[in-house]
Image: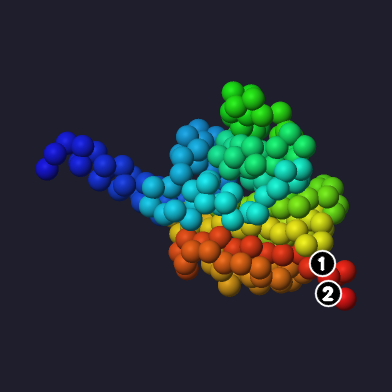
Amino acid sequence: MPAPLWICLALIGSFATLSIAWRFASRRHAIPCPVWLRWLVELDNPFTATNRAAVIVGHLELEKGMRVLDIGCGPGRVTLPVAREVGATGEVVAIDLQPGMLRRAQERARAANLDNIRFLQIGIGAGTLDVGLADRALLVTVLGEIPDREAALKEVFAALRPGGFLSVTEIVFDPHFQGRSTVLRYARAAGFEEKAFYGNRIAYTLHLRKPDMEQAK
């Protein structure tokens, strides 16, 4: 067997082993992706198109001037393309608990000459987000890392403008993978309604809309 193929198989095996170990460890503790593995989450997953940054951003129906929350932004894989889409009159609020992830995202934003990104080191669920100012919110393979998911989704719901929506992306390779039915249960309890679904059971993006009461009348 050619050496490159052996290397490829070894990398796939290592990734699978790490995912399984992480999944078992995560059953008792919320374990976000460590900063030293940031290179891994900077890359688009080669096994599914659902988690690719361009695909996620393409479904967001973004316009210039919008305000977007990227919750659990990591090193900014999705943050930067969103910032380009909303333009200089828009804003992306990049949120992460880990300062190392935020520093890497800031470095990448400076290198890309993007100055419409605001970085916040906070957790979600404690009521620290501004109320009713965001047009979109993102949780890309992050929801399962949040200890109090019900409180988190209620806070995101409050942070969105009526008619705005939350985009939740989940892939089964993530140790904290959340199934569609689980996400919908939390979302509906927070007040969201399902807007759109892309993908399949093991790799998907789910859009959750905050109802616009004026339009409903």
Report if residue 94 is visible in the image: no
Helix, strand or loop for disc 2: helix
Q: Position of residue 48 (x, y in %)?
A: 42, 54
Q: Label 2 is placed on what type of residue?
A: Ala
Task: Give the camera-side residue of 122 and 132.
Answer: 132
- Which picture quadrant has residue 178? bottom right
The colour scheme is rainbow
Report if residue 63 is visible in the image: yes
Q: Quadrant of the C terminus?
A: bottom right
Residue for point 57% across, 51% down: 58
Q: Is residue 43 left or right of residue 216?
A: left
Helix, strand or loop for disc 1: loop
Residue for point 49% across, 48% down: 52
Residue for point 79% across, 56% down: 160
Q: Label 1 is placed on what type of residue?
A: Asp
| Residue indicated by mark 2 | 216
Task: Give the camera-side residue of 32 and 25.
Answer: 32
| Residue indicated by mark 1 | 212
Q: Position of residue 85 (x, y in %)?
A: 65, 42
Cα gap from disc 1 to disc 2, whole angstroms: 6 Å
